[in-house]
Amino acid sequence: MTHPILQYKEKTGQSYYTLGWQFGFQNINPATNIRRYCLIEDDPSKWRFPKWDAILRIEKATGKEVNRKNLIDAWIKRHEEVNEK
């Protein structure tokens, strides 16, 4: 299962950095937030689940193409994949 944010990234052709800005992250490196949310690393300690306000911003920015349900489903699926190894 490809993470919904990665699917949206591929569909729109944006970088992690521009997605971070689109989703309202205005810290030094918004790309870091997005990469952590996408669960790319095999080490779960590097993963982050977005806080509620970030989920709402992501839903709004993507027109609910990326939504809370598919973020939760991706989180559960990724944990299952890593625990199977």
Image (tube, grey):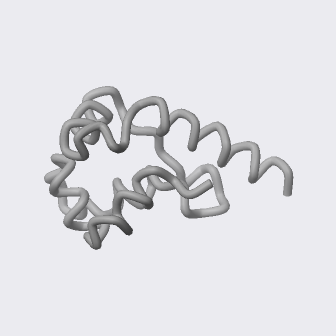
The C terminus lies in quadrant: bottom right
Q: Position of residue 43 (x, y in %)?
A: 65, 58
Q: Residue at x 27, y 66 (%)?
A: 12
Q: Quadrant of residue 55?
A: top left
Front-lying residue, 66 or 36: 66
Question: Measured along the vertical axis of the image, is residue 16 above or below residue 75?
Answer: below
The answer to whether 1 appears left or right of 81 in the picture is left
Residue furthest out toward the right: 84
Q: Residue at x 34, y 63 (%)?
A: 9
Q: Residue at x 75, y 44 (%)?
A: 80
Residue furthest out toward the top: 52
The N terminus lies in quadrant: bottom right
Q: Position of residue 7 (x, y in %)?
A: 43, 59
Front-lying residue, 1 or 16: 1
The answer to whether 65 appears left or right of 83 in the picture is left
Question: Measured along the vertical axis of the image, is residue 82 above or below residue 65?
Answer: below
